[in-house]
Amino acid sequence: MEQRVKTGRDIAPDCTRSLAGIRILSSLSPRELALLAVECEWRAISCNDIILNLAQGGGMNGVTFVVEGSVRLARSIGGAGRIAYTDIGTGGQFGEMAAFGVTETDLTALAREDGLIATLSENRFLELLSREESVSRALLCQYARLLRERETGARPADPGDRHGEGTGAQRVYRELLSLAEPHRDPDGGECLRIDRLPRHRALAARVDTTEEAVARAIAELVRRGIASRDYPGLVVTDEAALRALCETA
């Protein structure tokens, strides 16, 4: 499929290989979905698996459907080290822009949680679009919604994403967990680290809360000893406590 920096779990058994939950394919019959499923390359993924890293030689070999779980896409934008994030929840897909000839050279796809993905080759995906008008229409409608959300500044609604639930603090903590990557402290202990913590305004917009709520949430982590600032980043020293706060903040 592509160069795998981290290997996911073993491929799921055939009984779980269904594309019925993929939104742009919702109009296809069960038989058509089953035929497509056979043509896909399936992969079970674990939280924090790097699914794709174009900067390290990976390749976009098709369109990937997120059958279970969620995936975060990260792209560098501009020349100041800024990174744009896009979250793909259950039922979504990514990689279709490459099939349309849009070249990407700096894209990383990271599993946000355990799940299952299926990749259909570019040629087969383009054949599907040319044959099934309903799939093409669903994809166009998806792009239209994204454009409208970008124009209005609305936060995208993802029915498979729990990050929109709970209090502002809970949403901030879940977002921090999504951004954090496994790391080792100077003593060799395991921890999580965000190399470059987004500005409070950016975090607030991403999780639909206020800058003040973001500041309070991060300050509370530092006060409790759950995290420490390591400018421009953040080090999470107690992952279990942070996960608990996601549910009880």
Image: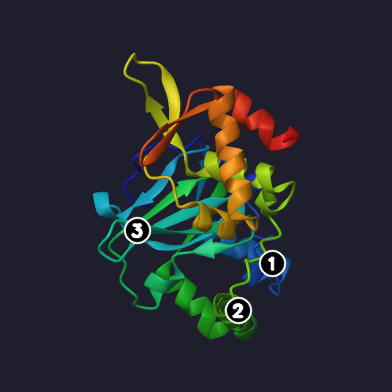
Which label sits on residue 31? 1
Q: Residue furthest top?
A: 187
Q: Quadrant of residue 102?
A: bottom left
Q: Where does the C terminus fall, quadrant-wise?
A: top right
Please tell me which of labels 2 and 1 falls first in the chain.
1
Residue 194 in view here: no
- In terms of secondary structure, where does tag 3 sit? strand
- In terms of secondary structure, where does tag 1 sit? helix
Residue displayed at 65% across by 47% down: 171
Three-letter residue code for mark 2? Thr
Q: Nearer the viewer, mark 2 or mark 1?
A: 2
Three-letter residue code for mark 1? Arg
Q: Is residue 137 above or below residue 205?
A: below
Q: Position of residue 76 (x, y in %)?
A: 33, 60
Q: Is residue 217 above or below residue 42?
A: above
Which label sits on residue 201? none
Which label sits on residue 82? 3
Q: Position of residue 78 (x, y in %)?
A: 29, 66
Q: Is residue 81 left or right of residue 248?
A: left
Q: Nearer the viewer, mark 1 or mark 3?
A: 3
Three-letter residue code for mark 3? Arg
Residue 53 or residue 31, whichever sits in front: 53
Residue displayed at 68% across by 42% down: 170
Please tell me which of labels 2 and 3 falls first in the chain.
3
Q: Is residue 179 above or below residue 189?
A: below
Q: CA distance from mark 2 to mark 1?
A: 39 Å
